[in-house]
Image: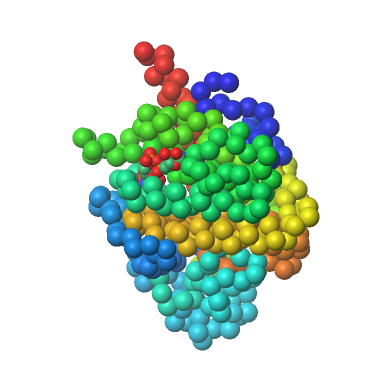
Amino acid sequence: NGYCTPSGMINDACCNFETIETVNKKLAPVLNDLVSTSFFRYWKTTLHKDCPFWQENPLCVLRDCSVIEAEESEIPEHWKSSSLSVVDESSLGSPFSFLAKSCEYEEADFCVVEDEASKDGCYVDLIKNPERFTGYAGESPARIWGAIYKENCFGSQNKLGGSLGTSEDGFDDTCMEKRVFYKLISGLHSSISTHICDQYLDRTTGNWIRNLTCFADRVGNHPDRIHNLYFTYTILLRAITKLAPYLEDHKVHHFCTGNGTDTQKIEDLVLQVSDITRKCGPTFDESTLFSGPGSHQLKEEFKTHFRNISQIMDCVGCEKCKLWGKLQVSGLGTALKILFSYDGRPELYKLTRGEIVALFNTVHRLAESVEAVDRFRDLHQKQGLNQ
Ligand code: FAD
């Protein structure tokens, strides 16, 4: 293997690295167009909730850390909580729920879901707030990552003790569900680190640069972290493949933005995404999880611990990191819900607009990370040749 060039099967998934790279070449540009559309670029979230676990002070050291909220006028009227109280949801012709939930999460949810109809929170234009280096470092993020990895410690057979950065080998005697849980978090961590290093602020020049040393230290020199990045992507792709027929069956005003041309464009792009993911074949087999004895309890524990991670996001001490952390945990939670909550019966899907937006943006984040790995590989080779 060359630098950052894993090959062969992705452990616990059912496709190989090469397939993911080939698919990504087609998928990434389409996802890029999709997340720029009005339906997918606005996401509502609460950035000022108290951390439920400990006292946390905002620690942003850079101006770039703060989030620019969207203008009220940018948001289609029928998404807003003020109009939702008077609109009959069914008249929107959308299968996605816009209305307030009666509790923080429902049985099927893997996350504590923030709902769009709540009076709290604000809309954020994700394009105007890119995920990149913010300078958030030190004790605060270390504590958050530590708390996140501790959530991996569940179930009677746990042998990991929630340690940070454990290598793949540590999982030989662990059940698949726990391996998957850990790999999802580690894959997300690799993806966030990849974005930080791909858009890194050179403080001496003030320029945004691609920082190979940063990438090598955090991801590139750790084959297990690269592996987990691709693994997380296989789960997200599988969720999109499962969701695709449901999206195609309910074409009517799915992605209603109040502008017909826009809506048509969004529907076309979503169809392209589902077409590409379907053609790539199965990337992950969800039936291998939660099928043995005790699996019901294991699934409930898995959910509880994943929901805890979604709440830990309220403790992130940098607004922009919190925005992307929340969005991606919500996107992963939505994928898990699609794969594990409905017994393979799409007619039962109950998803909010916020969850759909989070899911597609999270897939896009992973797609960009896989592209960035390729760019870092090139950079590594060029620098190697120049030495
Ligand atoms: P960290 O990335 O903090 O890692 C801590 C430890 O975890 C490492 O020492 C290692 O032992 C282990 N580890 C690292 N990667 C993996 C992996 N893939 N799998 C398993 N174990 C691993 N900073 C920004 O500049 N921009 C952002 O958008 C941003 N978003 C963030 C979102 C969240 C939810 C959090 C918690 C932090 C975010 N940060 C962001 C901070 C960033 O992730 C790092 O924590 C920070 O840059 C310090 O990095 P570090 O090198 O000390 O290691």
Q: Quadrant of ligand 1?
A: top left
Q: Residue at x 63, y 60 (%)?
A: 301
Residue occupying image coordinates x 49% and y 76%: 117
Here the colouring is rainbow
- Total marks in image: 0
Position of residue 319 relative to residue 21, above or below, is: below
Q: Quadrant of the image for the C terminus?
A: top left
Residue 66 x/y as whole percent? 30, 57
Front position in the image: 54 or 3: 54
Q: Is residue 358 visible?
A: no
Asked if residue 174 shows in the view, the reply is yes
User: Residue extending furthest left?
Assistant: 204
Q: Nearer the viewer, residue 93 or 368?
A: 368
Residue 36: horizontal and vertical position, in percent?
47, 54
Q: Position of residue 235 (x, y in %)?
A: 64, 47
Q: Quadrant of residue 73?
A: bottom left
Q: Is residue 281 above or below residue 156?
A: above
**The image quarter in which residue 42 lies:** bottom left
Quadrant holding the N terminus: top right
Residue 243, position as x, y percentages in the image: 67, 57
> Horizontally, is 93 left or right of 212 in the view?
right
Q: Is 349 on the left or on the right of 226, as rendered?
A: right
Residue extending furthest bottom?
A: 86
Residue drawn at 42 percent across, 66 percent down: 52
Asked whether 225 or 201 is in front, the reply is 225
Q: Is residue 378 above or below residue 32?
A: above
Q: Nearer the viewer, residue 243 or 136?
A: 136
Q: Which residue is found at the position 48% from the left and 57% from the top? A: 327
